[in-house]
Image (cartoon, rainbow, N blue to C red):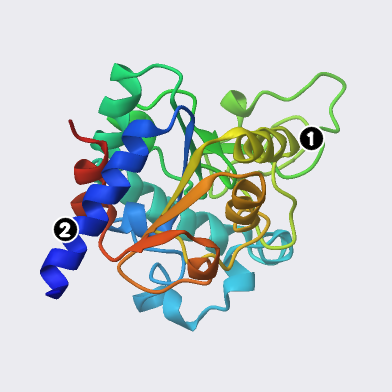
Amino acid sequence: MPMREQARLAIQAAHEAVAAAGRIVVLSGAGMSSESGIPTFRDAQTGLWARFDPMQLASTEGFRSDPRLVWDWYAERRAGVRAAVPNAGHLALARFAAARPGRLQIITQNVDDLHQRAGSPDVIRLHGDILQSRWLDPCRAPEPCDPATAEPERPPHCTQCGNLLRPAVVWFGEQLPPDALTRAESLARQCDLMLVVGTSGTVYPAAGLASLARDAGAMVLIVNPHASDLDAVAHQCLRGTAAAVLPLLFGD
């Protein structure tokens, strides 16, 4: 059978699986956002930033050592996120969710807001929100410090206790938000179909959600132009990008 016909039949089978599933969970990774022009973590280390070790730019230790360096790198990444727009994959998921309330839940490893801007409700964000900030340390002031009152420096700091604001993302060595992870694991155990989109499957515990879903009886589909560490877990792998494949799976 010609490769093109094989691909068409694979898409058709996956579309039918989506249509039949009562509870669908989508786990999205960096590949989904990269189609909107947001570089992956590694790709963001280009130009001026190529000479820095990832631990310098994405760890508590690196931030404490050179807070301005880390803040400026994230400022550049934030600007890229704000300039990006949701792609056809984001929009396909949002349209499906709007037309069929309660059937689809998105869990993302991405720290941008493209799913939300596309219109998807209640996205579970495992790795945080790059557009938000939080205090580096617990507040030391008599009254809780308000991030909105921080001095606008690089990085901003609290006028009461000197605490620094940092990006509200998960850095190396940090745990995922417990509530988000608990919800994600619960959804993985309860879904009929898990669709893994644009993730390499190397970052845990998020990558373990696919195995959790399959062990609980769900069908696992992967959408990725490249092979990933999760291919062995999947019932079916579709070689293509999120923007190209998701409209075919979630369209009428």
**Residue lying furthest bottom in this view?**
51
Question: Going by the image, does 84 lie left or right of 48?
Answer: left
Residue 147 point in image, percent of width and height: 62, 28
Q: Are marks 1 and 2 in contact (CB under 8 Å)?
A: no
Rendered location of residue 87, percent (x, y): 22, 44
Q: Is residue 181 above or below residue 146?
A: below
Q: Position of residue 72 (x, y in %)?
A: 47, 57
Closer to the camera in the image, 129 or 147: 129
Q: For the point 12% across and 68% down, which residue is it?
A: 4
User: Quarter of the image containing the N terminus?
Assistant: bottom left
- Residue 239 lies, with reference to residue 103, above or below; the image says below
Residue 63 in percent (x, y) is at 66, 60
Vertical side of 68 occupied by 106: above or below? above
| Local SS, label 1 | loop
Please name the amino acid that badge 1 sits on: Cys
- The residue that appears at 20% across and 57% down in the rendered structure is 9
Task: Tell me what residue is drawn at x 37 percent, y 36 percent.
Answer: 115
- CA distance separating discs 1 and 2: 61 Å
Q: What residue sits 87% from the left and 21% below the top?
A: 142
Q: Which residue is mark 1?
A: 161
| Residue at which label 2 appears | 8
Residue 140 placement: quadrant: top right
The amino acid pointed to by label 2 is Arg
Along the viewing direction, whichever of 2 and 221 lies nearer the viewer:
2
**Can you say whether 51 is above or below 228 in the image?**
below
Quadrant for the C terminus, please: top left
Q: Residues within 10 Å of mark 1 (few under 14, many from 20)?
A: few
Classify mark 2: helix, strand or loop: helix
Q: Which is more N-terminal, label 2 or label 1?
A: 2
